[in-house]
Image (cartoon, rainbow, N blue to C red):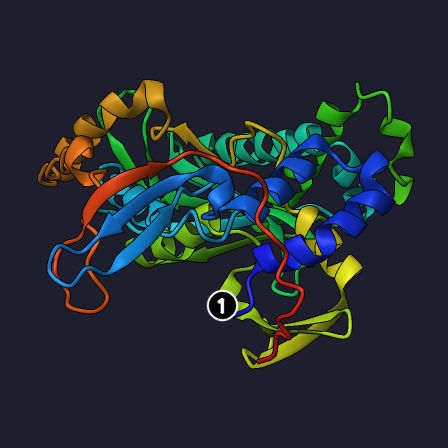
Amino acid sequence: MLELAEIFRRHGAAYRDKFGGRMLPSHRRAMRDIENCRTETLGGHVFICPECGEVRYSYHSCKNRHCPKCQHQAAERWLARQQELRLPVPYFLLTFTLPEGLREQARRHQRTVYDLLFRASAAAVQKLACDRRFVGGEIGMVGVLQTWARDLSYHPHVHYLVAGGGLAQDGCTWVPARDGFFLPVRALSILFRAKFRDGLSGAAWFTEVPEEVWDRDWVVHCQPVGNGQAALKYLAPYIFRVALGNGRLRRLQGGRITFTYRDSASRAERDCTLEVEEFIRRFLQHVLPKGFVKVRYYGLFSGKKRRRLALVREILGAARLPARASSTRRLQPAGLRCPRCGKAMSRVQRLEPRGPPPLREDIAWAA
């Protein structure tokens, strides 16, 4: 099966030779880690089956959050933790999209723009939610940054899962949101744009932003999502999944890569074929700055205020959620099973990290 790592091994060096002087350190690191993931470069262990003598090599993972091989189970663990926060109320999914005129600046100043995208959108939601015409209380929300569209194009936006209601100022009354309505998106859009502009005005490159950006409507969407469980399952993969998983890669042929994506309008599966250079560029533009936090909690869901959730559940008459299993137990690796006889294999040797793996230029990848 064609993998992103193989594409980087075969074409990454040429890409770095051409664009290395302009590449961000985070982009270089992501390429290197993905190329070396689960290869002898990172070392590993040798396992043997005591029953039939089968030998297997298990190489270490790179653990880079942009590697399609390393985030398989993380989403499920995150989803389990969110059950401790979820309240027995209707939920809403809000989406704030960065306008086209700001995306070039966002590419060049990722940390600044992404952080401001969070701060401006969250502040706009919290300010309107405090208004008694809408909610009139302190809300709880979790936000997730996503930078890609399905075809790998650059489309920065933030999703928020928000509890439908808030804790009133008296601290002992829950104010529910109206049935099927949370906040007016038109007002949210205006407030979001204003807060973003105020936050960006101090940047040295503020004048590079086209003036018409501030005169256009900014896209904000809000929809009810029931009890929030399905929305959490929708968001979880975006937290730990990279812009493109290996399963969507179809072929690498003649210096062109074909991958599949689902059209957002028709929901039909389509093919996208790009030159290798353009494919790598599109993928790397979604690599986040080192240490950037792409999941953020606000209001009642923020770390300092989560202790108030017990009070909210008491007000709502909800039962306390069961504690999750011990993290030590959950993180213990499962034993390796023999692929021939199914017996448990024994670890017999540790493999130290070695040099870079050879390129497999002789393999003609095809669907």
Q: Please tell me in which quadrant of the rendered image residue 351 appears.
A: top left
Q: How many numbered marks, from 0 up?
A: 1
Looking at the image, which residue is at 49% across and 68% down? 247
| Nearer to us in this view, 193 or 286 | 286
Looking at the image, which residue is at 13% across and 32% down? 314
Residue 258 position (above or below residue 180): below
- Extreme residue in the front direction: 53
Q: Is residue 139 left or right of residue 358?
A: left
Q: Percent from the top left, x then y, of residue 213? A: 83, 43
| Nearer to us in this view, 33 or 219 | 33
| Nearer to us in this view, 244 or 223 | 244
Residue 308 position (above or below residue 49): above
Q: Is residue 85 left or right of residue 326?
A: right
Q: Quadrant of the C terminus?
A: bottom right
Q: Tag 1's secondary structure?
A: helix
Looking at the image, which residue is at 40% across and 33% down? 136
| Nearer to us in this view, 87 or 173 | 87
Kind of residue indicated by mark 1: Gly
The residue indicated by pointer 1 is 247
Looking at the image, which residue is at 47% across and 52% down? 241
Q: Is residue 239 visible?
A: yes
Instruction: Give the crowd class for mark 1: few <14, some 14-19, many >=20 residues within 10 Å.
Output: few
Q: Percent from the top left, x then y, of residue 303? A: 34, 22
Q: Percent from the top left, x then y, of residue 334? A: 20, 48
Q: Percent from the top left, x then y, of residue 29? A: 63, 36
Q: Is residue 215 visible?
A: no
Q: Please tell me in which quadrant of the rendered image residue 19 appears.
A: top right
